Image (spheres, rainbow, N blue to C red):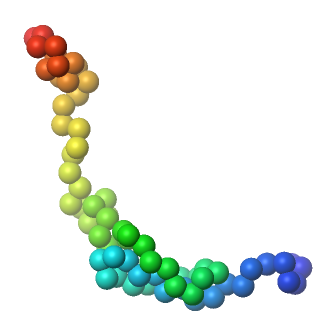
Amino acid sequence: MKKGIHPELVDCTVTCACGNTFVTKSQKSEMKIDICNECHPFFTGSERMVDTAGRIEKFNARYNKK
């Protein structure tokens, strides 16, 4: 690799809004994020089904057809 053309990678401390912190490599020394794998609903298993009715049920409910 050519010298002097690649960015310097340093240890980066990533801090989530939930308080979780972890270290990775980046060009910045610290980052703040809103959501991480410790508090995201997909990874915690607390996700909810948002769309409970299918397309046909929604159509029928909207136009009162059975």
Q: Is residue 55 above or below residue 63?
A: below
Residue 19: x %, y % from top left = 31, 82
Q: Is residue 37 above or below residue 15?
A: above
Residue 44 sits in which quadrant?
Answer: bottom left
- Residue depicted at 74% across the width and 80% down the height: 7
Left or right of 60, for residue 1: right
Q: Is residue 23 visible?
A: no
Question: Position of 28 compared to 23: left or right?
Answer: right
Image quarter in which the N terminus is found:
bottom right
Q: How many marks?
A: 0
Who's the residue at 21% across and 45% down the image?
A: 49
Q: Is residue 41 left or right of residue 5?
A: left
Q: Quadrant of the C terminus?
A: top left
Residue 12 vs residue 36: left or right? right
Residue 51 screen position, x and y as percent: 23, 38
Q: Is residue 46 above or below residue 14?
A: above
Q: Image point 11% across, 13% down: which residue? A: 64
Q: Residue furthest right?
A: 2
Q: Is residue 58 above or below residue 31?
A: above
What is the quadrant of residue 4 in the picture?
bottom right
Q: Looking at the image, which residue is at 63% across and 88% down?
A: 10
Whether residue 41 is visible to the viewer of this picture, yes or no, is: yes
Q: Quadrant of residue 40?
A: bottom left
Furthest-top residue in this view: 65
